[in-house]
Image (tube, grey):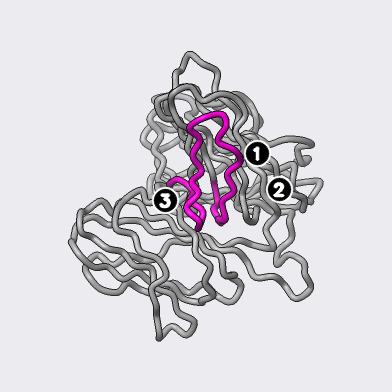
Amino acid sequence: MPNMFISLDVPRGEGVGLPAIVSNTGHPKTFVLGGAVLGGRYIVEGSNDGGNSWDILVDDDGTEALFLSSNGGAKSIDCIVAQVRVRSIRNSAAAAPPSITMGAPPALGNNFFSSIPVPALQGLGDPLDLGLRVGPLKTFTARGSTVAGARFSILASMDGVQFDEIIQFTADQQGARSRQVMCRYLRVLRGGALGGNPLIAVGGEPVQEASGGSALPSSELSVASERAFAVTATEGEEVLAEYVAPLSALAAATLTPDFAGVARGGTGTRFRVRIGGSVGIPDGDELAAFEASEVEAPRAGQGAPFARPGAGSSLIKITGQGNGAVLRSFDLLFHGA
């Protein structure tokens, strides 16, 4: 798989741009600004779970993915994240936004993404087993630990018995931070003041296979989120989530979409995957879909194979139809037909 170069969606005025799927890229990730920054700032955020754990990307030398002026230079961040997006703060909606481009090498194999169990009370949480295919670079995000005096230490172990601290979070929005450490198990030690229940997510690079190749073929790309999406439109389709996905970088000439999630809704409820069209509008070609029943249950649908897009990145939309219907924990996989 070749290096990836992708133009991130930069919002006009205040707000956040569409997330870009970067789960099949390695490190470092380099961000370059093109154009002027007039009084505000642009922040590149990363997430490992596609839900609420978004935070500014921070390199281990303290470099932040933050642009305050047009001469800020390139920002290179060692990190493994599933998605990136741009947040605009105090920028005028009247001025055209600058461009922000990300460049990154391909992942050595299948990057690892998960959440670490956080205990509700002081003490140790359950360990997370990373398995045997996670390499040394790991990126952590913690969101929701806003209680003054609270401490959340990430502990690492090779044998599941002896754990040592590798990083600590004491407040919300401390950045998506990375550490180089070889381990099989991770767990959280909670201390200090009680209150709140933060989400701590981790992304890890894969180990290099003995053959020098990838652990998994580069003809797959996954888009997933643990969030719960509710349909509020009284009629017709509603866009629930949108992403920029580099489908043109996949190896397979023909792709098949597999769409799954936990869904609930009344008669006529339908959740769809669409490609292309306009941002924020439920248009574009339908790739896959499934219907939901009144009882919440896992649902899945496979779409027909389609030709891999030839160039650039593709706009992918998750839409819902049926007022009050809910979709959560969805996973969309594009793979070779």
Label 3 to label 2: alpha-carbon separation = 36 Å
State which quadrant residue 56 falls in: top left
The residue carrying mark 2 is 256
Q: Is residue 193 above or below residue 77?
A: below
106 lies left or right of 291: right
Query: Residue 164 got which mark?
Result: none
- Give the label, 3 or 2, closer to the camera: 3
* Residue 202: percent from left, percent from top: 47, 61
Q: Residue furthest front?
A: 71
Q: Is residue 64 magenta?
A: yes
**Mark 1: few/some/many CA within 10 Å (<14, 14-19, 20+):** many
Mark closest to the chain's N terminus, 2 or 1: 2
The residue carrying mark 3 is 175
Mark closest to the chain's N terminus, 3 or 1: 3
State which quadrant residue 192 falls in: bottom left
Label 3 to label 1: alpha-carbon separation = 35 Å
Q: Of residues 328 and 44, which is closer to you in this image?
A: 44
Query: Residue 287 got which mark?
Result: 1
**Mark 2: few/some/many CA within 10 Å (<14, 14-19, 20+):** many
**At numbered mark 3, what does the secondary structure look like: helix, strand or loop?**
loop
**At numbered mark 2, what does the secondary structure look like: helix, strand or loop?**
strand
Q: Which residues are magenta?
A: 55-83
* Residue 207: percent from left, percent from top: 65, 70
**Mark 3: few/some/many CA within 10 Å (<14, 14-19, 20+):** many
